[in-house]
Image (spheres, grey):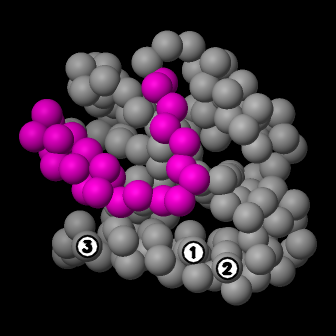
Amino acid sequence: MKLIILRGLPGCGKSTIAEELSKKLGCDVVYGDSFKRDFMNNNINFKNEDIYNYAHRKILEELENYFNERKEILIIEELFENKNFVEKLKQFCDKNKIEIKWFFIKRDLEKLLEVEDKRDRKIKNKLEDFKELEKCLDNLNNEGEIKIDNNGVIENSVNFILNKI
């Protein structure tokens, strides 16, 4: 099995790239945000940590399900800012001989803010939020990870990834 990881800040294009890759590769995508929304819709009092812990647990469960179903390729898109979560994912993949292809999707902060402004969310990220998250993401290095400048045409990023996998 091959696991394609798309990580990056909110609004950098992870979901759009994942959708396009899914079409071209004929594989499924696990969206971290879908688990976060599910958690927030079903819980009243919670902390951000609760949301992320739930999403991370669900992502690992999905990975295990796809592995057990003998799927060839799976795409996961998420921030991947939590070192413990990343280590659990790597351990599972090492144990089960799953090849991981890491892609760090980057986009200029100005463009991220433009995307965020257009999103229909109750709570919106601000420049300070993006800078703090960016530090977390930059501090987490994954062996063989490829950084992608996604400030241009999405199709270029998709084709770049296809050439690397």
Q: Mark 1 points at which residue?
A: 90
Quadrant where the C terminus sits is top right
Question: Does 81 sit left or right of 35 as displayed?
Answer: left
Query: Pointer 2: residues within 10 angstroms few (<14), some, or many (20+)?
Result: few
Q: Which amino acid does label 1 sit on?
A: Lys
The quarter of the picture where residue 68 lies is bottom right
- Residue at the far top: name it: 152
Tag 2–tag 1 contact (CB < 8 Å) = yes
Query: Which residue is drawn at the image coordinates 48% and 43% (left, top)?
Result: 104
Question: Does 54 sit left or right of 137 as displayed?
Answer: right
Spatial separation of the CA atoms under disc 2 and disc 3: 26 Å
Q: What residue type is labelled 2?
A: Asp
Q: Give the mark nearest the N terminus, 2 or 3.
A: 3
Magenta span includes 147: yes
- Residue at the far left: name it: 128
Q: What residue type is labelled 3?
A: Glu
Magenta extent:
126-150
